[in-house]
Image (cartoon, helix red, strand yellow):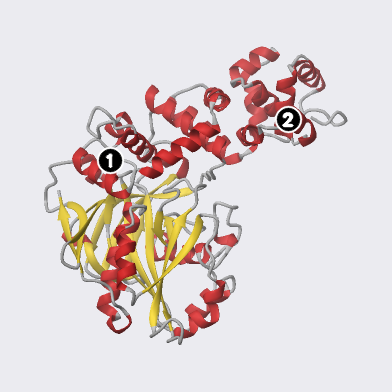
Amino acid sequence: MNPVTGWTGRTACALQAALRLSNEAFAERLGIGVRTVATWHQKPSLRPRPEMQQVLDTAFEQATPAIKARFAALVGDQAHADIAFPHDRPAVDAERRLSTDPNICAALDRLDQYAGWEPGVARHQVASRLARLDVGDLQDRAGRRRRVDQRQVAEALGGYYRGWTSGHGRYSARYRQDGEVVTSVLTHPGWLDLDCPLTSVCDRLTLTSAAADSDLSLDEQAAHAAAQRLAETLATGTRLVDMPLYRLLDIKVAKGTVGGLLGATQFVRYALTMDLLEGELVDGLAADVPARPGYLPLRDQYLSDTASVLGVAERLCAGGTLALCAIARAPSPYRGPADYVLLIQERSGNVVNAPRRLAVIPKGFHQPMTDSRADARIGATLRREMEEELFGREDADNTIGKPYAADPMHSTRLSEPMRWLTESPGRLRIECTGFGLNLVSGNFEFPALIVIDDEEFWTRYGGQIEANWESLALRQYSSLDSDSLIELILDPAWTNEGLFALLQGLRRLKQIRGSRVNVPSIEWQLMS
């Protein structure tokens, strides 16, 4: 609070956050109406009347030194905050985000709505959990989670879900003579080897305006799990952005065609519900909890059986697309014959989805930018993710800021590498290689293959390819190095959807570009 200009809605809310009070409790403490507190949240630049300024002055003066220090941190008075909390910077930063981060504020509002709580209860619930959290304990838990690998997850979910019908099964693959890997991706023979160019003729997912995002009601257990998720997000500095997200309502795929219906939802809705299933499962496996119905309460509620997995229209089915990227390289006296470089990412610990795991790149949630109907095509997400994750276009990253450009993918805004790829037909080939439903969180997955055949691209732009904040590191593999590719397939750090995309991408790459590829024979099969 500025002693000269006085209180604003924002600083009044910061005092509320420092006191760790709900809207109702804060209003009662000040002796004012709850609606006034709600107005401060809605209008942070509002300046309360003189008599209200005095009430806020009194509340601040009566506060303890610790509360004043939290308030100083929340309003940006860093000198006082550092004196009060010299060893607690994560807690100070988390308190500030709880009060000032618009995405967290939106999540709190939505949690109040979903749980049927009065406005402000979610803020109080999250603040109370935040005060009790130990970041060291969360780091220890992250370490335990990393020990639970892709194979354990796939096996556990195979035991939880049984009785698939109509030819569905978990995607697995055999390579060479005796090697086999199994994933948690549910698929079907008609959903695989689509060989579908992601052009307007073949890429035909459609957004329907007829399907409104239905009301969501969380019971007490689910609501408290969501509040804990928000508290941990704040404590660990994980980036959470509430952007529009597509949800799958119907799927119609066949050889050469990707189609179906999409609805619209918000990312926070997914983050506070379906995205909690992975953490519950992995924590249970780390603690030797049986992965069976009755032992995983959130899974029992949101994705309880095979019918709920396949009934995408009756539940929230978010997801996205991810692609194996293969870029042609000329022969080298040091490396050897002409090949493709295959790019693999190690995911950052700051992402909401699949932290510290291996994945192909690009990988992204299917969501719109500025044209929700045109962006419904899978290829639109992949091209945007190439710009964001490979070519450094920060303005294409909707987790950093809102897309203010009318057409973020207009040719005049493209990065130099992407502009070069799109200037001439045939330089960039993008195909969808399959479709599946990931049993981890019920997500839809569209694996794809990106092929750049012109060797000039790597010569010109190979040094400019650099992953964004979502990746911890990039690895590269040669399409001629069969032994390294086998080791890669066997790495237990894979996400299940990433391994699905890798295997389908390698199969297709070998079919279309045999002379540059020495990939082991990979044959898929479906497991119950």
Residue drawn 56% across the image and 24% down it: 120
Q: Which residue is mark 2?
A: 11
The image shows residue 283 at horizontal and vertical percentages of: 36, 35
Disc 2 from disc 1: Cα separation:
42 Å
Residue 439 seen in the current view: no
Q: Amino acid at mark 2?
A: Thr
The image shows residue 271 at horizontal and vertical percentages of: 44, 40
Counting the numbered discs, the total is: 2
**In screen coordinates, is 3 left or right of 91?**
right
Q: Which residue is mark 1?
A: 314
The front one of 119 and 326 is 326
Q: Closer to the N terminus: mark 2 or mark 1?
A: 2
Q: Nearer the viewer, mark 2 or mark 1?
A: 2
> Crowding at label 1, few (<14), some or many (≥20) Cα neighbours within 10 Å?
few
The front one of 163 and 464 is 464
> Crowding at label 2, few (<14), some or many (≥20) Cα neighbours within 10 Å?
many
The front one of 328 and 434 is 328
Residue drawn 48% across the image and 22% down it: 117
Q: Which mark is residue 460?
A: none
The image shows residue 204 at horizontal and vertical percentages of: 32, 64
Residue at the farthest right position: 4
